[in-house]
Image: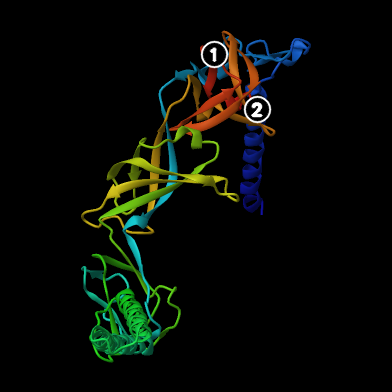
């Protein structure tokens, strides 16, 4: 029985010894942060304090291990331009975009194009069967016949009048009838021209809509068998994408830094590593009421159709700036709701100072308020003394 109980006693003794050594190590390795009023007996004579508080100052004494863990550097001062990067998107140039409207009401009987198709000028886009077109042809034929009839009557009355056998009132009436017929004929011809067809086609009911320009079908709002009863509603949109716009929404606080002709660099997630260079072509005169942003557009040639409408982009504006102080992000610390840095006022003596960070740039940030050129701050390890 004694043999069976002996090993557990050894294990218990070993555990107790380990605990005692661990406690002794903690006691020997302990550091006290000492203020001038602290009792010196709390600080072992051979172990210097990590740091000493003197009013609002923190002193790192000689021999403190913190001196090897803190890095202090002078703040950077920059006066070069900064880059303002904003999201954007590709849009078709409105000056190169045409909505295809039905000039007459009718039924779409043929639709040889699909969304996204490329078309050439004069290509058939849709065929509409329209009773209105047939009526326009009939009105034109009727007006032409009436012009011929009243013209013949006018010639006959003129002949009688010259022979002295006709009354003047008959001649005047014939002239008026001919003029009215001519006006009605001109109206019927203008109607056919407005529709986009020529006169003398008989009683055809079908109208072929053709592409007015070369481009791509960027929107399609009809299908074979659908009715086009609203002549103000487009059937489709054709856009020439040889040149496109990239539109960015610039915040109200930054719009003063953007002007027409300003150079911009644009990148697209679809083409990593490729940068497109352009200039600002348009700045909206209206600020969006909800987002407080202003539309800014840049024109880009697009000969290879790489840029497609609705494609996302990142637009970089080069914004001039006055001289400003920059610090690494590692120098910025949070103290409650305030951003602070530790400023060196004397060698290894620091003061906690609130700052107002501005925009970020790389791994640093501009400081709009709280630091001055020439200040030295803790850029590494500040969290160790941030209480």
Q: Is residue 381 above or below residue 137?
A: above
Are discs 2 and 1 less than 8 Å apart at CB?
no
Give coordinates of residue 192: x percent, y percent: 31, 79
Q: Is residue 304 visible?
A: yes
Could you tell whether 362 is left or right of 68 in the image? left
Camera-nearest residue between 239 and 188: 188
The label on residue 26 is 2
Question: Residue 332 falls in which quadrant of the image?
Answer: top right
Give the residue at the far front of this rendering: 164
- Residue under label 1, please give it: 375
Q: Vertically, is 113 above or below 252?
A: below
Residue 125 image label: none
Q: Secondary structure at mark 2?
A: helix
Residue, x 28% and y 58% (percent of image)? 241
Residue 37 position by quadrant: top right
Helix, strand, or loop for circle 1?
A: loop
Residue 87: where, in percent of width, then height? Answer: 44, 47
Q: Is residue 302 left or right of residue 35?
A: left
Any part of residue 108 in sight: no
Select label 2 or label 1 by which is in front: 1
Cα–Cα span, label 2 and label 1: 38 Å
Name the residue rendered at 44%, 83% in the picture. Answer: 229
């Amino acid at each position: 029985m004694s043999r069976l109980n002996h090993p557990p006693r050894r294990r218990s003794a070993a555990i107790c010894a380990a605990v005692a050594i661990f406690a002794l190590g903690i006691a020997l390795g302990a550091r006290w942060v000492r203020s001038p009023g602290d009792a010196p007996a709390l600080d072992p004579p051979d172990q210097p304090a990590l740091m000493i508080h003197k009013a609002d100052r923190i002193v790192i004494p000689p021999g403190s291990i913190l001196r090897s863990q803190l890095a202090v550097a002078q703040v950077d001062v920059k006066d070069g331009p900064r880059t303002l990067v904003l999201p954007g998107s590709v849009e078709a140039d409105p000056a190169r975009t045409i909505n295809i409207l039905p000039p007459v009401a009718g039924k779409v009987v043929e639709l040889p194009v699909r969304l996204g198709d490329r078309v050439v000028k004069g290509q058939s886009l849709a065929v509409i069967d329209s009773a209105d077109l047939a009526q326009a042809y009939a009105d034109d034929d009727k007006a032409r016949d009436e012009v011929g009839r009243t013209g013949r009557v006018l010639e006959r009355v003129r002949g009688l009048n010259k022979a002295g056998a006709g009354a003047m009132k008959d001649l005047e009436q014939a002239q008026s009838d001919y003029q009215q017929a001519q006006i009605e004929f001109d109206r019927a011809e203008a109607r056919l021209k407005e529709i986009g067809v020529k006169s003398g086609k008989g009683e055809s009911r079908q109208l072929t809509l053709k592409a007015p320009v070369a481009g791509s079908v960027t929107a399609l709002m009809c299908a074979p068998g659908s009715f086009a009863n609203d002549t103000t509603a487009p059937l489709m949109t054709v856009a020439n994408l040889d040149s496109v716009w990239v539109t960015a929404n610039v915040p109200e606080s930054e719009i003063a830094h953007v002007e027409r002709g300003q150079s911009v660099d644009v990148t697209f997630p679809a083409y990593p590593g490729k940068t497109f260079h352009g200039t600002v072509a348009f700045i909206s005169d209206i600020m969006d009421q909800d987002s407080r942003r202003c539309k800014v557009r840049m024109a880009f040639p697009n000969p290879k159709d790489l840029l497609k409408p609705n494609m996302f982009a990142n637009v970089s504006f080069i914004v001039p700036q006055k001289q400003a102080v920059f610090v690494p992000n590692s120098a910025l610390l949070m103290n409650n709701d305030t951003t602070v840095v530790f400023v060196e006022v004397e060698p290894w003596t620091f003061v906690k100072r609130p700052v107002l960070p501005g925009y970020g740039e790389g791994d640093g940030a501009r400081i709009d308020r709280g630091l001055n050129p020439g200040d030295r701050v803790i850029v590494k390890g500040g969290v160790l003394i941030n209480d």
